Amino acid sequence: MVVLQAESEIASIHMVYGGAGCGKRVVTSSSSPGISLMQEGFSYLAGAELPCLLMNVVRGGPGLGTIQPSQSDYFQAVKGGGHGDYKMIVLAPASVQEMYDFTKLGFDLAFKYRTQVMILSDGAIGQMMEKVELDEQIPRLTDEEIIKKYPWTTTGKTSDRERNYITSLDLNPARHEILNRKFQAKFKKIEENEIRFESIECDDAEYLFVAYGSSARVCEKAVQLGRAKGIKVGLLRPITLFPFPYQEVARLAKQVEGMLTIEMSAGQMIEDVRLGVNGAVQVEHFGRLGGIMPAPEEVLNVMEEKFIKTKVYA
């Protein structure tokens, strides 16, 4: 494994472009402002269909903000970030174990679809210490194996193979539209096959938390506290933020009396939750800002205030 400290985030993301073009498993990481600097490179990677892994350990913003945990980069990650019509798979870990597991999963998905994959973490998980079970190390592919497995790679011209060209530039409008249609078909296929989520105490739930990452761990404890008080509350944790589990949200909306999204932001994922609910049930948001994490007792109290104490009985 090669570990390289780049001179800047802009240099780093374009090193990823070069390494990915050679068929290597390449990853880069940063935290919020650094990810903003990489956005042009993200778009170039999407246009060239280069598989790679990106990690954003989110800190509070906007601007220089704080180094404390936040989830305020949801829009940037899930809705594209860079210019042009593209999306990327976004995985939201809630533990150190998942940070490890999603690294392997992310690379597998990246090469399956020739796309970039982002692990959207936060400053809490990024500095957390937990036990992790490691898999057996898999030998890296040789150059010959890369050429055979990934024939699109730019590994040089050989006697039995022409050289490849990788670019995102196409000045022919008709041809470029066809290329963009191809991208959209790929994103649709990802939405059809790669949705992941976790349901906790949802079978008989009357009220539902929707949260990801560190906020989901807070809500999991809040569910336990609520159940101890006799409140039938559950948790839906999206694991993929793109593709988002709209269908599961819609299904649960027919069952519960209210949904509360918990985010360390002013409210971003709530827009996708509302799209899934489509007006079927009341959806509210509670968030903490500035690097402050919500507490389990706090979010349960908000659930009670917004839905249970205001409930009108016939």
Image (tube, rainbow, N blue to C red):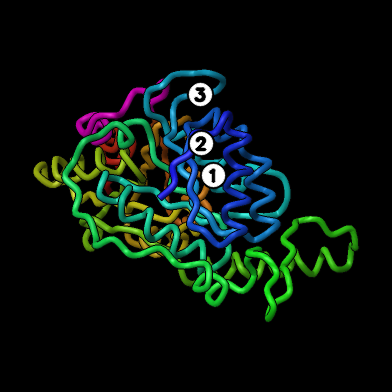
Q: Residue 77 carries which label?
A: 1
> What residue lies at 38% left-to-right and 42% top-to-bottom?
261
Do the residues under discs 1 and 3 have CB atoms within 8 angstroms? no
Residue 291's x, y, as percent? Answer: 38, 23
Which sits in the foreground, 250 or 312?
250
> What residue lies at 65% left-to-right and 44% top-to-bottom?
41
Q: In this rendering, is residue 63 above or below 85?
A: above
* Residue farthest along the left direction in this orientation: 228
Does label 3 or label 2 sit earlier along the sequence? 3
Does label 1 or label 3 sit earlier along the sequence? 3
Which sits in the foreground, 214 or 297?
214
Do the residues under discs 3 and 2 have CB atoms within 8 angstroms? yes
Q: Which mark is residue 49?
A: none
Q: Magenta residues, as a range?
A: 288-301
Q: Which residue in the protein does label 3 denote?
A: 61
* Residue farthest along the front direction in this orientation: 159
Mark 2 residue type: Asp
Tell me the CA gap for discs 1 and 3: 15 Å
Tell me the CA gap for discs 1 and 2: 6 Å
Mark 1 crowdedness (10 Å alpha carbons): few <14, some 14-19, many ≥20: many
